[in-house]
Every structure is written in structure tokens, then in C-alpha cells.
Amino acid sequence: MTRPAAEKILAAAIKCFASRGSDVSLLEIATNAGVTARTLYRAFPNRRALVEAVAVSRLDRILEKVRPLIEAQQHLADALVTGFVGFIRHARADAVFIAALDEASDWHMERYLVGPDEKFFKRAEVLWRSSVTRAVNAHEWRPGLDVAAVNAWLRSVAVILLLRDDLDAKGQEQLLRNFVLPALVNIKPGR
């Protein structure tokens, strides 16, 4: 299977998801990509693999938008709040990402987002790395916390916030400030 064929299929899947949600057949995606069903199945052995690829592709796009928001913050508390609220806003606005997650919910996609899957773990680690490093050096990071364990927990927080459609940005921020920040941040008086 050539990489260009897989990329064409993924692009066609994203286009189909954007116009019709995940209610599109693999044959329709293959047709839109200009490939045979056999070529599609060589690139993506089943629907689940293709939906996961769509979700990962869109997640990368969302993280590209969120990373500058996080990097612009000087303090870990601000980076966490800005990053999470920005992530939820961009994720919810991405109809393709939501369609992929909606379909994948039958397969418990949240387990991929919060479990040990390397693809998601590394993305979260990279997203928070510079803010956490700065926080450790500035003594904002609570002593004794394991960065890898916190990374796993932060992915869980992101999924919870994404699923909590009853919370607007202000409610998300309040939840983060009341529960997440005290667990991670050595907040100095007056901050």
C-alpha cells in the first residue's frame, strides 16, 4: 500500500464525514478517493482503523490550534485553563472529529484517548511539555508529582470536559480552577 493512496483515502473520509457525518459507507469513501475497495482495505483493514485515523488526523489539527494558546501563557495554571478551554472549544467545533468520536463511542474511543495508546499519549505529552518544564523550573509544579502519570490524568480530564456538554467555557474554567489546578499547581499567594 502506498502512502499517497492512504492519504487520499483519509482525505476522502474526512470530506465525507464533513458533509454527511460518519453515516457513509467505506465503498463511498473509496469511490470519493478514486480507489478500489481493495485498495481501501489494504490501507485500512476495517472501518474502525479508518475512523481512528480520521480522529487522529483531526486531533492533530485541533492541537495545532491549541498549542500556541498554551505556549503564550507564563504560568502553569493559566496554561492549563487556557489549553483545556481552547481544546474543548476547537474539538466541539470540529464536526469531523465529533463524528469520528461519535461513531467510535461504540468501540469505546475514550479508551484510546485516555488509555496507554502511544499515539494519544505522545500527543498529550508534547502538548504540555514546555509548560510543565517551565512550571517545574519555577517551582509551580507540586513536588512529588510524576509527569507521566499527570499526563495520563490530564487526558482523562480532557475527555471528561469534552463529554460535559452542560458546561460552557466559564463552567469549564471553574471546574479546572477548583479541582485540577490545586492537584498540580503550587499556587503562590497573590496568584
Image: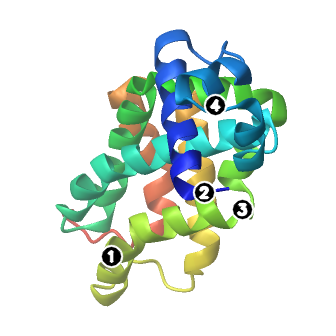
16 or 34: which is nearer to us? 34
Query: In the image, which is nearer the foreground, mark 2 or mark 3?
Result: 2
Q: Residue visible at 57% across and 15% down? A: 21
The disc, 1 or 4, on the residue closer to the chain's N-terminal end is 4
x 64%, y 72%: residue: 149
Residue 74, given in percent of the width and then of the height, sits at 18, 68
- Which amino acid type corresponds to the residue marked 3 in the rendered image? Asp
Q: Are marks 3 and 4 in contact (CB under 8 Å)?
A: no
Q: Nearer the viewer, residue 136 or 6?
A: 6
Label 1 to label 4: alpha-carbon separation = 28 Å
- Could you tell me if the residues under marks 4 and 2 are in contact, i.e. CB atoms within 8 Å? no
Q: Quadrant of residue 50?
A: top right
Residue tagged by mark 1?
130
For marks 1 and 2, give the one nearer the viewer. Answer: 2
- Amino acid carrying label 1: it is Ser
The mark that comes first in sequence, 3 or 4, is 4
Report if residue 67 is visible in the image: yes
Which residue in the structure is indicated by mark 2? 2
Q: Earlier in the sequence, mark 1 or mark 2?
A: 2
Q: Which mark is on residue 101? A: 4
Q: Return the residue nearer the eye: 39 or 64.
A: 39
Does 90 sit left or right of 45 as displayed? left
Q: Which residue is mark 3?
A: 117
C-alpha distance separating marks 3 and 4: 16 Å
Measured along the vertical axis of the image, is residue 69 above or below residue 93? Answer: below
